[in-house]
């Protein structure tokens, strides 16, 4: 009998802005950001078993299984399982690795949320977010599943509703190391904190963008391309890159620019959403 695979969405996010406001004694950065969830992402498939063995069916190139956030998320949750406690995980990647749109963090959150149900762990969202934070600073936003302002290292979240927009997300054929960016001596770390009530896109920025554009010409070229072909759109790098985005009021306008995107870039169109498609699928 062929094993049954159940598939769940693993949505992307973009940082509409990213301010580095300081640094904690442990070296982690204090930040402010606005995490905008998108209706596009990867998919994670689940085969549950009673063997207590966890495996990934499709290995990511250059990523050992035990280093994969999906595997680590399942192992972190396994001790809380009341039944079954084993699984084979399948990953259908659509989001670029190292793009700053949350692919790995979202995958980990999907595993935590789905296995919490399938393994009958009975953990709350806050408990799952605490586990997720140990895996990566961006995991909690996907666990809670709301577009939100963020502070701390990204774990202090204030859910909000944003005006409906469409986003062209484009990525050069490179991967930017988050570690390299956050350990760089050239990174700005003293941006004054803002009052979220006074937020506007135009009055914010991505503090990592200047550094990444300086060290990765492919990102600089893509940002310049967007200025030329989408002059009326608001554009910016997301996270630590390498993906950049442009904001549009209408999907057809975003589609026109996507069709002009040079072949050296990968791109997609997504709608901004207030609630994660995974949470809607799980009914939570």
Image: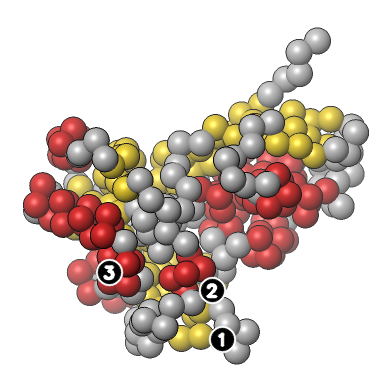
Q: Which mark is residue 44?
A: none
Identified at 47% across, 62% down, the residue is 177
Work out whether residue 28 or residue 78 is closer to the camera in this orientation and state it.
28
Q: Position of residue 160 (x, y in %)?
A: 42, 61
Viewer can see residue 128: yes
The answer to whether 23 appears left or right of 248 in the picture is right
**Mark 3 burial class by Cα count in 10 Å: few <14, some 14-19, many 20+:** few
Residue highlighted by disc 1: 24
Locate the C terminus by quadrant: top right
Q: Going from the N terminus, do you reach mark 3 or mark 2 first?
A: 2
Res. 138 image quadrant? bottom right
- SS at circle 1: loop
Closer to the camera: disc 3 or disc 1?
3
Locate the N terminus by quadrant: top right
Q: Going from the N terminus, do you reach mark 1 or mark 2 first?
A: 1
Q: Position of residue 180 (x, y in %)?
A: 47, 69
Q: Could you give the CA–CA distance between mark 1 and mark 2, rounded to whole angstroms? A: 9 Å
**Label total for image:** 3
Farthest top residue in view: 1
Q: Are marks 1 and 2 in contact (CB under 8 Å)?
A: yes
Residue highlighted by disc 3: 214
Q: Is residue 161 above or below residue 169?
A: below
Viewer can see residue 126: no
- SS at circle 3: helix
Q: Could you give the CA–CA distance between mark 3 and mark 1, rounded to whole angstroms? A: 26 Å
Q: Position of residue 184 (x, y in %)?
A: 43, 78
Residue highlighted by disc 2: 153
């Amino acid at each position: 009998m062929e094993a049954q695979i159940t598939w769940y969405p693993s949505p992307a996010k973009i940082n509409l802005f990213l301010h580095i406001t300081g640094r904690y004694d442990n070296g982690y950065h204090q930040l402010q950001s606005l995490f905008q969830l998108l209706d596009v992402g990867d998919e994670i498939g689940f085969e549950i078993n009673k063997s207590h063995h966890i495996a990934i069916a499709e290995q990511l190139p250059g990523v050992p299984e035990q280093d994969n956030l999906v595997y680590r998320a399942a192992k972190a949750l396994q001790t809380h399982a009341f039944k079954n406690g084993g699984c084979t995980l399948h990953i259908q990647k659509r989001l670029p690795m190292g793009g700053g749109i949350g692919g790995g963090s979202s995958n980990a959150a999907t595993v935590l949320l789905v296995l919490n149900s399938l393994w009958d762990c009975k953990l709350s969202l806050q408990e799952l977010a605490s586990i997720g934070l140990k895996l990566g600073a961006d995991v909690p936003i996907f666990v809670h599943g709301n577009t939100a302002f963020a502070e701390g290292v990204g774990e202090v979240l204030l859910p909000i509703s944003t005006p409906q927009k469409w986003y062209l997300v484009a990525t050069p054929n490179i991967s930017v190391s988050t570690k390299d960016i956050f350990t760089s001596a050239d990174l700005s770390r003293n941006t004054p904190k803002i009052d979220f009530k006074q937020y506007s896109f135009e009055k914010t920025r991505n503090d990592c963008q200047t550094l990444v554009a300086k060290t990765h010409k492919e990102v600089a070229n893509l940002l310049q391309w967007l200025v030329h072909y989408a002059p009326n759109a608001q554009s910016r790098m997301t996270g630590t890159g390498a993906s950049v985005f442009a904001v549009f009021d209408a999907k057809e306008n975003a589609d026109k620019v996507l069709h002009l995107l040079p072949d050296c870039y990968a791109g997609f169109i997504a709608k901004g959403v207030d609630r994660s498609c995974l949470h809607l699928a799980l009914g939570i």
